[in-house]
Each structure stands twice: as structure tokens, then as C-alpha cells.
Amino acid sequence: MENKEILKILNDVFQEVFDDETLILTRETTANDIEEWDSLNQIKLIIESERALNIRLKSRDINILENIGEMVDHLSKVIN
Amino acid sequence: MLFNDPVFLFLFLPIVAFLFHWTRRKVGGSASMVLIVAASLLFYGWWNPPYLLLLLGSVIFNYTVTHQLLKNPSKLLLITGMLTNIAVLGYFKYRNFFMENIGLLMGENWQFEEIFIPLAISFFTFQQVALLIDAHDGQIKRIKFLDFATFVILFPQLIAGPIVLYREMDKQLQSLRGGRGFGLSLFGLGVVTFILGLFKKVALADSIAPFADSVFSVANQLTMLEAWGGVVAYTLQIYFDFSGYSDMAVGLGMMFGILLPINFNLPYRATSMIDYWKRWHITMTRFFMMYIYSPISLLIMRKSILNNWSKQKQFLLAIITPIVITFLVSGLWHGAAWTFVIFGAVNAFGLIVNHAWKEWKLPKPNMFFGWFLTMLTVMTSLIYFRADNIVDANLIILRMIDPEYLVFPNWLSYYADYLGISWRTLLVFSSGSYTVRMAGWIIALVIFALILKNKPSDLRKIRPTVGLAISSSAMLWMALGWLDEPSTFIYFQF
Amino acid sequence: MNTEWRKFIIVTFPVALIFIALFVEFFSYILKDVPLRRHDLDRLVVALQEGDAVNSPTVLLGDSITQDVLKSYRIAPKGEVANLTTNKASGVVGSMFLLKRYLKKNTPPKRIVFASTPEFFGYDPTDKAAEIYVTSVFNETEERSWLLKNMNSIFNNKRIEPAILNIESKIGYKALALFALTPDSLIEGDEMPNKMPVLESSSVHSSIQKGINGRSNEPLILSKIVGAALTNICKMIHKIDLYFIVAPMPKTTYLKRKEKGEIDSLRNKLFEHLNGSCSNINFIDINEYRVFPDIAMRDSDHLRRPGWTAEYARLLKEIINNKIIRN
């Protein structure tokens, strides 16, 4: 799966978890850019991402990612 | 040795800094790492030489386990390694607490001789446990002993954090070794950051400390105003004490060309409990989130989605439970006493309410109201953190809210009579001048707490201007002037 | 290191450090002769210096229990009794220095009266208290040499005291002192201490009771330094009459002390020590005139206002006017 596709799917997941259709993700987006981001939403993001991409993630891997770009790269690694 | 010791400031630091960079340039990165490990051991051993053995033992043991885990990631080995570390920590820090409580349950009143808690044991234990887990997960590929030792023992963060993850230091150590590190490029910024931290600790925290102490030492004789004053004073004290220390750690790291993670981000500007915990003791929160909260929450949340639990059930089991567990552990990590557990519980409660509010999509409170509620919760938790025991903490809280304790000091008797409030000579607010000085310090520190930034949005944005030189010089002088007694940092017996 | 920061570390920052230090030093030099006004003792010292001579026949010395009372109540006609009472912190040493300064402008009194807690004679100022109430107040040459000779330990040997490291005392307090009005007279209360209703029974707050109970644990002694100060007082004025009045004590403390014979013991120690130096020494225990119940105290050492402080003032007035002055 291409990174661009992953980013699109991730965007949909974020829009759903944060209940915000206007949310647009870029590779540079970080947790600080999204006000509602907290530990709980992070869990939901992980689970929804897992469902959307049909993979299994480890929370520890997600926690230390700096931005969406790194997350996409990580997801890509897991998928492939 | 402490960062605010004259021996450290005028002897140890200049000499080690010089030797480190000289060695780095003339001999090589690895040599300079050896030097700084040796210096850090001297730093640690200065306080109590025998405990060096404990530190070294811990490092050697954990390195051996890590090395093995990298070759063969056995879960059994990981668990054994983790349990050994926790057992040692448990023995030194929690044995008495554990045994005394068992005794109480059995109706006995056992008193144990105090075990001296080795400095920094909570920090270096946690840092290494995290490393073991990362090694098992394959987060780390390979690790030399020198790198491992530097990572754990580095004196800027050895005693009281920040809690560093190996992956944060890995690349930096490689660069250092290869002669491509930050070198001296962060030195100036490091000096300025260190001075800021020293100022916060020595000039701010230590100045307001006696006022907080005088209130907390007479919990059962306080009036409402005194109680509030003391609690606010302590809330400010602990922030400047710990963030000052963290600033010093980061500054020192920069002086040696290492970037350590920051620990605070204007926490008293937080407008919600969730916000607060993104700003307070950031590396510790990160540790607990990564290694306790997330795994538990993820596990339960997955189950809840799989089994289609109701919203309430999901909230109770997947949200409340992990938060409670995490914060009870966190509370206990701060100290072996029930007051610390309650400190954790109060925070957990605040967070749960916050999350519930969001989950059930209740209208967002106005920012000031959110800030106010958050500060109230934080202060309540800190009352338990600071008080000698639960009874004292409860007494203080009672006096803060029960109108029966609203008594004016005798030097305000005129106003008290006018307002129909009782007055008498108070214990803490016995004189106007004392109270005014305390109020002055509180107001000054509140302003500083809300303005002094912890985290420059971009390090390179700080320019070495004349203004910076003047403010740093002023802070340095004030810190030196107030350096009379090196009292320890609060987060010290951790 | 890039050139910007290099310049900062090597030039800008050190220059700023030196500049600020010099600036503060200069500022403190300007404020050098401003007399400090941090507390009542500072005020008293300024009043002695700036005020007119009162030439009182009686000088009254003592600690805060008496000082407190004299702020409100009049115990003698104006100018009869010079009020040089202080709080405990400056010790009997402080009383001695004040007397000396008093004598610079005023004629020697006929009598000196100490009206204080008995613990006053066992107390030597130390550490921070000594700094704030003794060494920073009494810093004339002779005073300093007396202190060096008799109380060497209170000097913390800070040879170099640049203003920049002592901003609080060299600049902060001095700057605040600029705003204080210059006192030109000693404190004399105005109210007449007519017998006011006093509460005989009521309950004592537990914290106060605790303090009272603990007070008698401290034995009454005559410290060496206090002894030296008293001897010096006797030497200062030829043929001076010296009176020691024991101020009111809570009943619990008084009974315990009486039981152990401590008050008589102190009396004897004082007489013994001053035998050669002073010709006429007298000892009066106010608690024999009247027992002060525990409820009379607002803490372990001080009397409640207004009734009990008035009672002490009344007794003091009576003793001074009838027993002391008439003699």
C-alpha cells in the first residue's frame, strides 16, 4: 500500500475519532496541532487504524512517534 | 552532590565541562564518553560512596540482560529482568511501607528501622526497565556497554530525571562517537537554561518554601486564610523546585552537547486535567502512558469493541480502570506512603471526570472556569503530597472550606469587626509584615509561573541578545546571593 | 559554537555580569547611610539618634511582653520613664547597647528597670536573629569590638560582602526605609490602664496550652553573655539603682517554676553576679502581686489584649511609681 493511501485512510480515521470533518492531516501534523488529542483518543486512534488497515499495532510504537509522517511510515512498515 | 552546591557550580562543572570538550576534540568521542561516565560516578558517589556499588551493579546486570534480549527476545528473560529491578527498588523504597501495612492488617504495630533510600533509584530503575522492554520489542538494534552506561549514568539526568528513552539518546551518542554531535554549539544556550533553572530553584522555590513549611507544620491550628496561603505557596514551590531542576538538567545536557527531553510546559496555565498532565513532569507521564496506561487500556478497549460493550461499561473498564491503576502506581512511585497514593487518586479522579465530560459531550466550560477547577484539583492532590500524613491533609482541607475557620488576624481586627468576622492572634499570620512578605512572594511567583516559558518553541529561535545577557546575569546573581543553604530538591528522595 | 553564541559567552554575558554587579554596588553606596527600618528596634535606634533628649530619671528595659503593653498604656507621666524595651531577639545585649546610645544624648538616669520574662536572661541571639537584630543594628566600632570580644560566634565571617550578593539587606531594606517617616520620640502609650474587666475563666485554646505547658521545660539560667552585658550596664553609670521585675507568667508555668525554686535561683544568680559591680540591686516578682491564669495569655509568652495587658500595665505603673520612684 502506498503512503499516500495510508495517509488518506488515516485522515478518515482521525476525522471520525475527533468527530471533525474539517480535519486535514499532513505529514507534519503533530499531537500539539490537534487540541482534543489525549491518551484516550490515542487508544481509539490505534484501534480504528487497526481496523481500517487490518493490522495489529503496539501502543508503545505509536506513543513515541513525532508526527503523522512518522506514523504513516510506521504503518507502512507494519502493513508490508 | 547537588546542582546548587558551590562545589558543583565552581569546581566540578567547569572542570568536567572543559575536560569533556577537550577530550572530545583531541582524543575522540568515545574517550569523552568514558570521561563523563567517570565524572558522573564521582558525582553520584559524592553523596554516599557505598551506593555506587548499587548503581554499578544495576547497570551491569541490566546491560547483561539487554545484551541477551537483543540476541534472543525471550519474554521470560524480560519478566525476570523487570522483576529483579522492581524487587531491588521495592526493597529499598517500599519494604518498610509494605511490612508496616501488613502488620497493621494483622493488628500489629511494627516499626522498622529506616532504610536509607539510595539517591535516584526510582529514576535509574525506570529508565532501565523501559530499556529492557524496548530491547525485547526490537526497538533497539544493538547497544555498546559504553553507550548503555552513558545513557543511565549521565549526571545531568541521573538524580531526578528527566526520564529519557534510549531511542532519544541513541542517535546522539552515535554522533558523539563519530565526532558529529552538537559539540559546543548548544553550550551558550545550555548555560542560559541552567541559570534559569538555578534561579527558579534557589531564588524562587527556596524563598517561598519556609512559608509553606510554617503552614504545613501546624495543620491542626490553622485558620482558613493561613491554610489557603500555605497550599498556594507549596503549589508554587514544588513547581519551581522541580521545573528548576529539570531546566538545570536540560541546560547541563546542552553544555555537553546532548539534548535531553523537557519536563514542563507552563502547567499552571492548564485549563483541564488532561491538559495539565500534558504539561507536568512530561517524561514521567510519558513513561507511565507508554508502559502502563496504553497497554492496559488498549487491551481492554479492544475487548470492549469486540464484545460490543455499552458505553458505560466501556468507560468503567476501558477508561476508568487504566487511569486508576496508572495513577495509583504513579502516586506510589513518588513515595512510600498512603498520602502519595491519595495524591495519585485525586489526580485520577480529576482525569476521569474530565474524560467523562468529553465522552458524554457535555458543553465545554469557559476557559477560566476550567482553569480554576483544574488548579483546585491539582492543589488538593498536592496537599496530600506534602502533608506529613493523611490526618494533617484532611485537617488542612477542612480548614480551607469550613467557614467556622474563617478567622482574621489580630492586626486586621478593625476590618474584621467591620465585617463581623471573628479575630485573634494567629499562629502563622502572627504579624502583618510576615503575611505581607508571604503574599508578595506568592504574587511574584504566580506571575513567574504563568509567564516564564519552559519550552522554547524552537531552540534555535533564542538569540544571544544583550537583553538575554542582562536577564541571565541578574538571575545568576540572585541565585548566587540566595545560595546560602543548599537545601535539597523536593523530587530528591525519589 | 557559532560566532553569535561565542561572542555571548566570552563577551556579552561576562560584561553583563560585571555591569550588574557594579550597578548594584553603586546603588547600595548611595543608600549606604540610610538607616534601616525593618522592625521596632530599627525605629528605636533612629528615634534615639534623631529625637531630642528626654533625660528621664528612669530607663525601662525589657522584652516583648512589656514592649507590647507599653505601646498602648501609659505607666508614668510623660518623660518620667524612657521606654527602651525591645523584643526578645536582640537580647539583653541589645538592651545594653541601647542604653549606651541613650546615654550619648541623655543624662544618666537614677535607676534602670528591667521588666521582662525571666527567660530573657538565659537567651543569647544566634544565627539569623543575631544578624537582623544585633550585628546589623549595632555596628559602631565600640559595639562591634564588644561583640567580637564577647559574642564572636555570631559573626559569620563574611569578609567579602558585595552588594550584589546581599541585595535584600543592602538595597531592598534600605530602599524601603526611604519611605519611612523619621520617628523623633520614644514610644509612650496613651491610655491609662484603669482596671478593665478581665475574663477569669474560659477555655484555653489547645495550641496555646501546649505552648504554656512546654514553656517550663526550659530552665531559667543566667547566660554568660547576659552576665557580661549586665556588668557592663552597671559600669556605664556610677551608683545606679538596678531593678529586675519578673513579668507576668501563665499560672501553669509559674507554679512549676516556683516548685523547682527557679525564680529564687535566678534572683540569687543575678545578685551574686552583680555583687561587685552594682551597689543597689532589687528583685520584684509581679506574679506575687497577682496570679495570671493561663487564659490571660494569647500565646505562651504574651498577654491577651486588652484586659490582661492593661492589668500588667496597671501593676507595672503601681510598682514603678510607688515602690521604685518613691524609694
Image: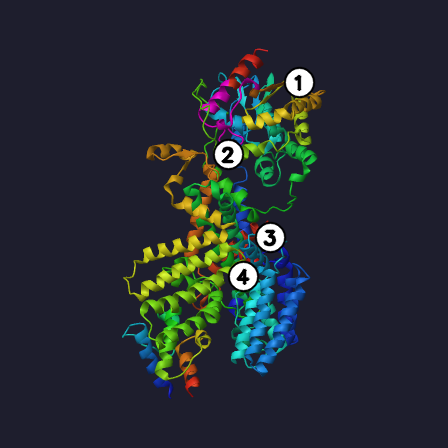
Label 2 and label 3: CA atoms lie apart by 33 Å
Q: Eyeballing the image, is B230 above or below C220? A: below
Mark 1, Cα crowd under 10 Å, few <14 / some 14-19 / many 20+, is few
Q: Name the subunit of mark 3.
A: B
Task: Check disc 3 and report its element: helix, strand or loop.
Answer: loop
Q: On the same chain: label 1 and label 3?
A: no
Q: Which subunit holds the residue at mark 2? A: C
Foreground mark, 1 or 2?
2
Is the same chain shared between marks 2 and 4? Answer: no
Specify few, some or many for label 2: CA neighbours under 10 Å numbering under 14, 14-19, or 20 or more: some
**Tag shown at residue B110:** 3
Numbered badge on residue B248: 4
Asked if residue C55 lies in the magenta stretch, the reply is no
Label 1 sits on residue: C238
* Location of the C terminus of chain B (image quadrant): bottom right
Name which residue type carries label 3: Trp
Residue B259 is tagged as none
Residue visible at 70% across and 34% down?
C149
Question: From the viewer's perspective, is B353 left or right of C203?
Answer: left
Instruction: Nearest to the eye among marks 2 and 3: give it.
Output: 3
Disc 4 and disc 3 in contact, CB within 8 angstroms: no
Q: CA–CA distance between discs 4 and 3? A: 41 Å
Numbered badge on residue C208 = 2
Mark 1 or 4: in front is 4
Quarter of the image where the N terminus of chain B is located: bottom right
Q: Secondary structure at mark 2?
A: helix
Q: Quadrant of residue C245?
A: top right
Report the residue that reaches farthest toward the front. B106
Residue bounds of the magenta highlight: C288-314
